[in-house]
Image (cartoon, helix red, strand yellow):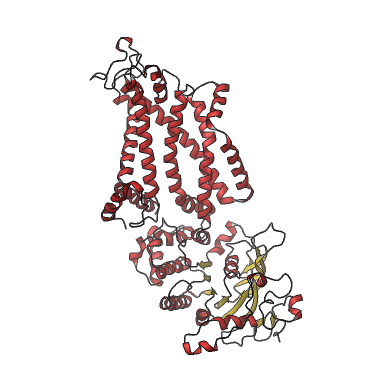
Amino acid sequence: MGLVEAIDLYKSYDEKAKEKSYAVQGVTLTIKQGETLGLVGESGCGKSTFGKLLLQLEKQTSGKVLFKGQDISNYNFHKMRPIRRNIQMIFQNSTNLFNPYFIVKQILMEPVNNYFLHESDAEKEKRVRAILHSVGLDESYLTRYGNELSGGQRQRIGIARALILHPEFVVCDEVVSSVDYTMRNQILQLLMDLKEAFGLTYLFISHDLSAVQKVCDRVAVMYMGKVMEILPSINARIKHPYTKALLDATLDVNPRNREKQTMSLKETAESESAIANEGCPYQNRCLLAQDICKIHAPKLKNIGDDHAVACHVVDH
Amino acid sequence: MKEHTDTNLLKRTFSRLKNDKLALTGGIIVLLFILAGAFATYIAPHDPTAVNIENRLLPSSWEYPLGTDQLGRDVLSRIIYGTQVTLRNAFLVLAGILIIGVPMGMIAGYTGGRIDNFIMRVADIVLTFPSGILALAVVGMMGPGMLNIMLVLVSLWWAPFARVIRGAVLKIKEKDFVMAAEAAGTSKFQIIVKHILLNAASPIIVLATLNVASIIMHIAGFSFIGLGTQPPAADWGVMLNDSREFIATDPALMLWPGLAIMIVIFGLNMLGEGLNEALSPHTQKGIQRIKPWSVQRKVSTLKEDTYE
């Protein structure tokens, strides 16, 4: 049993439309206690939606979310309350991350005020200072407005806000996608240190494969709302053609290797690459696509060592 | 905790308003009128309804600074009491509009779906009524009187308010900090108050300030055509109406109430405009909106502005 489990999770935003289009379709995924599961995929493939579904910040269309074996997918606010503090999210950096009228102290006080009702103001403030130190900022930031901070500082405050309740499970949504490379390494290191210190479990959502390689134990690859492959470790042999294409798309630092860069997926017009109603969602861009891919959607199949692949061609 | 925001927000708003000369002037004008209205009993030199035919149509003197009207009543006292009546009615109407419009807009914007549709369609219908015609109809049925006019204004003018607030709420509720608050275990009610209402406050305040101006105009207008406040009560609209017959012989009689209306509306508009800028959380030095008539002024505020 994992810490957090998604069972056949579907999410559609246009519930009234006749032909539903799903942001997340039929994802079943288990996140084990203490691990860092990477979730990669291109923009718009439903990674963030999946993270928000796990935290019940979005309501699923169908399917279940289990936290420690407990089905939390239909909990109301009061039932959710004790669970809420154990599952937190570090949001993608944006200008809307914090209420523009709040200073850092208020930003960090909000979760504390919700959960440590019986503590005195001094005790609450001690928590705020403690978490601020753990993310590497000093107390002078307490009176600054969220909008006055730099990108790295904002991200640190975002991390502090998620961790101040000492959760067990944290969804990191594109935490390093908007900071520069030196800052990126600092933030990743900070996340790893905090994981050690607080005993956290991460779902690390990212399109940045090098960041994923740095921090993740297992990696799940998503395409068009479906999980295509689950790698048991970052060194595992990649099977799925889409995962290969994703890896090939990362740029090499060494300019001499540029020649060797290959394109391992079909460039298709936007209309063609639109998700096929039947068969494998990747069929139109896949180099290995065969007739069966157009008829049956491949199921995620375990091919040993916890390695799972959803592909007719390579799943053996 | 809460006080901290408020003082900070207030401090910031005041320091910005102080640098905006036009808004400051507007604020002072409005404040003076409010004070005059509030303390009318102590300030006014005469009884505003005391008729004295022997002193009718006197020019200004020490005894009657703005002269007397056709019934020998002191014009200055009537203007001061008129301030009280007009502002009280205007703020009552505004309160009514806020009490209906703000919750309607918040509910429509936050819940969405059918409730949103229903509220907005009602607002659409309300918006199609011209307030003048409806006021005539209501007065025709229920008789003239300021209360009827005020009810008409409230029942129509909450709709544009609700629309603006709904728009602001729609924009705010999509922002990450709202979802983050939910993740932090904040209840829906608190999210609405602490995050959405706080961020929607500036358009509400600005709109309210500008709205008071047009409410005053309408109140005076309805009184002028005899549908609102009834003589002999002092009201700017009533005074204007009374002075109609004497426009050729004593134009000053019409000048004073007209001037009062003009100045208070000017003040409210300037204050509203200034508040619009001062309340924005993002305005910083350098990226202030440039008003066409005050390029020189902006340059000087750049130097003086100590807000960070």
The residue furthest top is B54
Q: Residue at x 24, y 18 (%)?
A: B63
Q: Quadrant of the N terminus of chain A?
A: bottom right
Q: Residue B211 location, x and y as percent?
A: 45, 38
Q: Residue A45 location, x and y as percent?
A: 61, 71
Total label count? 0
Is residue A230 shown left or right of residue A166? right
Compared to residue A189, the image places residue B138 above or below, namely above
Q: Residue at x 47, y 87 (%)?
A: A255
Q: Residue at x 38, y 19 (%)?
A: B243
Is residue A281 shown left or right of residue A147? right
Of the pair B275 and B258, the residue shown nearer to us: B258
Is residue B63 shown left or right of residue A34? left
Q: Residue at x 56, y 51 (%)?
A: B110
Compared to residue A79, the image places residue A205 above or below, namely below
Compared to residue A111, the image places residue A194 above or below, namely below
Is residue B286 shown left or right of residue A118? left
Can residue A288 be seen? yes
Of the pair B187 and B98, the residue shown nearer to us: B98
Can residue B189 be seen? no
The residue furthest left is B62
Q: Residue B164 location, x and y as percent?
A: 51, 46
The quadrant where residue B250 appears: top left
Q: Residue A208 location, x and y as percent?
A: 52, 77
The residue furthest front is B248
Of the pair A159 and A275, the residue shown nearer to us: A275
Compared to residue A96, the image places residue B73 above or below, namely above
The quadrant where residue A68 appears: bottom right
Of the pair B38 and B290, the residue shown nearer to us: B290
Q: Quadrant of the C terminus of chain A?
A: bottom right
